Image (cartoon, grey):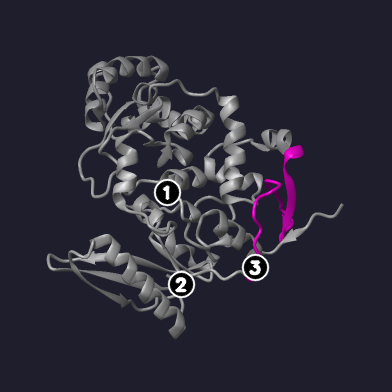
């Protein structure tokens, strides 16, 4: 049987539907984060804005309460980056991600520690961290105490978090948090053991497809940081449906997952920095045109806040503050129609009123178009 070919527009609308970006959802942040399989959280306020843009009546206190009650955790997860994830998903998926975490940081860890057994050190840290939550500064200091003579300690905290299931304790991850995050052992914080890797891997793949499919094996690997997933996909193949994209790549999906028409209207949306919509596929053209990538992915500085027009990234945004006011700066990558500019102004005003709680004056301005070729 010839597999159906999905166009770029169909892939775009399928992903937006599953990412709650075609229409705002009526449920709460716990269910939203579960459906999204986490929200990237390098920037403390970003997950809040990511939920605001996806939910009908989201309030910041709703997410803060979930973090405080340990229903949501902040930890190093997919692609060895910080995410907010439901506690249930963390318990289920964390050990399945361990190979990606170890591979990302083990070479650096081993090189800097002159062959020190990372498992040995993890055991020592476990005793130390069970006394009370520890900051990265404290973990690096303890490392230096255990193993004097190590010169480069800058990334030792990252190495520890890659080898041990640690979570950041409340109030880290909350709106406006500016302190040093403290870490503790996940199983102790959540009061339950973590699921076996083989159990978690199956769920990881199926949950990814529900949130980001249809997708290729390369897409799943790009999102998770795991490699060599073809075998795991083959085991699941009888449960999945398959398609091809316009380049001929095989795509996998859940049998009952939504596939809206490419003609389905897609409203303008503001996405926060590091939003997973932009990072969850090896082929990012389903949301970001190749020519716009240099304006969005800015090397070590990160992934900019962006806005969608007709489902695709058409520009970036940021909030500039002074003691007296705030300005939403909208940076289009191409000329915008008057209708789109008005839609962005209306949505931008909603964003600014939500961010400020009406407590500060604000304005919205469009910046000049970027110079091509830079």
Q: Residue at x 36, y 27 (%)?
A: 160
Q: CA distance from mark 2 to mark 3?
A: 30 Å
Residue 61: horizontal and vertical position, in percent? 29, 48
Most foreground residue, 27 or 302:
27
Q: CA distance from mark 1 to mark 3?
A: 28 Å
Q: Under tag 1, what secondary structure?
A: loop
Residue 233: horizontal and vertical position, in percent? 69, 37
Q: Is residue 45 above or below residue 125?
A: below
Q: Is residue 111 magenta?
A: no
**Mark 3 sits on what residue?**
262
Displayed quadrant of residue 362 = bottom left
Q: Is residue 242 magenta?
A: yes
Which region shows up in magenta? Answer: 237-263
Mark sitting earlier along the chain (2/3): 3
- Looking at the rendered structure, which numbered label has been put on residue 28? 1
Label 1 neighbour load within 10 Å: few <14, some 14-19, many 20+: some
Q: Is residue 76 above or below residue 349?
A: above
Label 3 neighbour load within 10 Å: few <14, some 14-19, many 20+: some
Residue 77: horizontal and vertical position, in percent? 44, 37
Q: Residue at x 49, y 56 (%)?
A: 278
Is 226 displayed left or right of 361 in the figure?
right
Is 242 displayed left or right of 300 in the figure?
right
Q: Under tag 2, what secondary structure?
A: loop
Mark sitting earlier along the chain (1/3): 1
- Looking at the rendered structure, which numbered label has been put on residue 373? 2
**Quadrant of the snapshot with the C terminus:** bottom left
In the rendered image, the residue lying farthest to the bottom is 338
């Amino acid at each position: 049987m010839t597999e159906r070919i999905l166009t770029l527009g169909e892939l775009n609308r399928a992903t937006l539907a599953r990412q709650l970006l075609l229409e705002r959802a009526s449920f709460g942040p716990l269910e939203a984060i579960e459906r999204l399989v986490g929200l990237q959280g390098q920037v403390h306020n970003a997950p809040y804005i990511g939920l605001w843009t996806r939910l009908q009546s989201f309030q910041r206190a709703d997410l803060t309460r979930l973090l405080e009650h340990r229903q949501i955790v902040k930890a190093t997860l997919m692609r060895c980056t910080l995410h907010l994830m439901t506690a249930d998903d963390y318990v289920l998926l964390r050990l399945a991600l361990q190979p990606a975490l170890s591979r990302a940081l083990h070479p650096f860890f081993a090189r800097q520690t002159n062959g020190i057994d990372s498992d040995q050190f993890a055991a020592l840290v476990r005793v130390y961290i069970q006394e009370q939550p520890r900051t990265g500064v404290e973990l690096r200091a303890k490392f230096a105490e255990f193993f004097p003579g190590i010169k480069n300690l800058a990334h030792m905290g990252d190495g520890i978090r890659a080898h041990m299931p640690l979570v950041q304790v409340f109030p880290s991850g909350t709106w406006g948090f500016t302190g040093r995050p403290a870490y503790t052992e996940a199983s102790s914080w959540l009061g339950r053991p973590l699921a076996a890797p083989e159990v978690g891997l199956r769920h990881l793949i199926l949950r990814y497809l529900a949130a980001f499919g249809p997708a290729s094996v390369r897409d799943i690997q790009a999102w998770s940081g795991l490699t060599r997933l073809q075998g795991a996909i083959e085991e699941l193949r009888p449960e999945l449906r398959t398609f091809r994209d316009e380049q001929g790549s095989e795509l996998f999906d859940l049998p009952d997952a939504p596939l809206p028409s490419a003609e389905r209207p897609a409203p303008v949306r503001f996405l926060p920095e590091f939003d997973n919509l932009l990072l969850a596929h090896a082929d990012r053209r389903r949301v970001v045109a190749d020519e716009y990538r240099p304006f969005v992915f800015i090397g070590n500085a990160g992934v900019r806040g962006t806005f969608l027009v007709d489902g695709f990234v058409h520009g970036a945004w940021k909030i500039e503050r002074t003691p007296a006011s705030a300005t939403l700066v909208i940076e289009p990558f191409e000329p915008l129609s008057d209708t789109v500019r008005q839609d962005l102004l209306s949505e931008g005003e909603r964003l600014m009123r939500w961010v400020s709680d009406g407590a500060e004056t604000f304005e919205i301005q469009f910046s000049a178009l970027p110079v091509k070729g830079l």
